[in-house]
Image: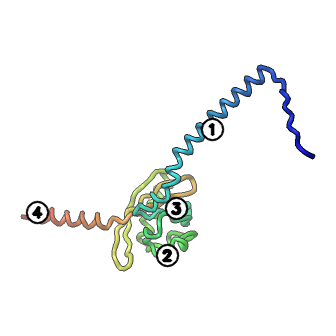
Amino acid sequence: MPIVAVNKAIPMEERDYELLKKENEALKEELEQLKKTVASSSFRDRYAVKIIDSLPDMLTVFDMDEVCIDVVSNESTNHVGPSVSELRGTKMREVLPSEAYLNIHNNMERVKATHKSSVAFHELDVNGVHHYYENRICPLDDNYLLVMCRDISDRVAIQRNMAMLKHALDNV
């Protein structure tokens, strides 16, 4: 059956017309707000991965039972041995030496108790070289913690050299 267009005016009350007009204006305003939101968040959406990948930190998400949920930084920041895919679902104590584990564990416990970010330090041997790390832990919500580990070996070496120089100068 063919569709036939009928051009008849449908009678509308003035009040109905005004309501439709107001609703149309409200929808236009809502659309403009959505466009602004998309425009402002699009930079973040476009660059979030690039920003994270450019950071020198290993960024890992753990649940409250210290199980690795995901490594959100790029693979090159991984300093604990197993690949990123192998780390998912693994308990932290299974991949770290006991001393490093205890330092990070204690920091996690502090964050869980206070619900505030905290910084601590640990050491690891990576490929036969001793490294010093800062671990900054932040609560993401009631279920997850973000653990950011940064290699601070260069900073520690500079601080030690400065201390030796100061000691030498003090004894002149």
Answer few, some or many: residues within 10 Å of disc 2's Cα (few below 14, many 20 plus, some between 14 and 19). Answer: few
Tell me if 106 is positioned left or right of 70 in this view: left
The residue that label 2 is drawn on is 82
The residue that label 1 is drawn on is 31
Q: Nearer the viewer, residue 163 or 84?
A: 84
Query: Residue 8: which disc?
Result: none
Q: CA distance from mark 4 to mark 3?
A: 46 Å
Q: CA distance from mark 2 to mark 3?
A: 16 Å
Answer few, some or many: residues within 10 Å of disc 4's Cα (few below 14, many 20 plus, some between 14 and 19). Answer: few
Quadrant in which residue 86 is drawn = bottom right
The residue that label 4 is drawn on is 169
Residue 76 locus on image (x, y percent): 43, 70
The residue that label 3 is drawn on is 61
Q: CA distance from mark 1 to mark 3?
A: 36 Å
Q: Nearer the viewer, mark 2 or mark 1?
A: 1
Q: Nearer the viewer, mark 4 or mark 2?
A: 2
